Image: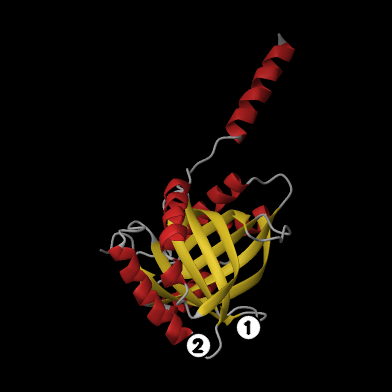
Amino acid sequence: MKYISILILSLSTLIIAEEYEFEPVPNKAEYFSGKFNEGKNMQDLEAWAEEFVDWAEENNWRKSSITAIFTPFFNDDLSDVDYVWLNILPNASEQYSSLGYWLKNSSEFWATMPATNTRVVDVWQWPISEPSSGPGDQGMVRFSRCKLKEGVSLRKAFDTYKRFAIKAKSSGDNMGRKILFGPSGTDDSNFDYVYSLYASSMGEFGKSADNFMENLVGSPEAMALGEISSCSNARTYITKNIKQADQY
């Protein structure tokens, strides 16, 4: 009877240990990056992006998607890419069905793009927090590659980030956060996920960074982040919103 009680207690502890506090709501994202064609620059790409929005409207295509362009800024190799083009979709079904339409109907328009993609990455995203001010015309985003510590699952990491985001918001933070994982299109396996930290304006990004140093460093929620993973290779980009979901 004693051993049965111990077994039941052990199983109960295991079940409790596997429970999670928060439930992720996933979405899909496509990250295109590359170089400008000869004689072209970001202004040309932004002008083409306006035509892209018109094409999408005319073809009733990806009405629930979000599109943004990133310009590399704080980066260890600014010669690597000239831009990053981001598409966010609510799920894989819509992503791939709309890709089928794009491949079948966009060849003439696609040929006018003033840049050449050298890398295309498909990922799942778990949003953690969003800026309360909504998307701005020019924001900032930072990506870091992270390796989970032994015995830590991605779901546990998500809960830890959620608890930190709640604590941060209570101190005046207004940052967006995401976990990116399950990539297709990259051969780098030295990380488990990418952590995205973003703001709707460059000023808000700096303000929230100051808030972290003044009010969050040393807090239990911040300390817990160091217990789930180690992150490195942070790269920061200036962002420009091109298309919001259901804008037309």
Give the residue at mark 2. Answer: 40
The answer to whether residue 182 is left or right of residue 140 is right
Q: Position of residue 239 (x, y in %)?
A: 45, 75
Q: Is residue 187 visible?
A: yes
Who's the residue at 67% across and 81% down the image? Answer: 77
Please determine whether, in this image, residue 110 is positioned above or below residue 11. below
In-front residue for pair 25/244: 244
Q: Is residue 129 visible?
A: no
The answer to whether residue 7 is left or right of residue 242 is right
Q: Earlier in the sequence, mark 2 or mark 1?
A: 2
Residue lying farthest to the top in this orientation: 1
In-front residue for pair 233/160: 233
Query: Quick one: label 2, few (<14), some, or many (20+) residues within 10 Å?
Result: few
Q: Tell me which amino acid carries mark 1.
A: Leu
| Alpha carbon distance from label 2 to label 1 | 17 Å
The answer to whether residue 198 is left or right of residue 233 is left
The answer to whether residue 159 is left or right of residue 90 is right
Give the residue at mark 1. Answer: 78
Who's the residue at 55% across and 35% down the image? Answer: 19
Who's the residue at 43% across and 70% down the image? Answer: 108
In-front residue for pair 15/112: 112
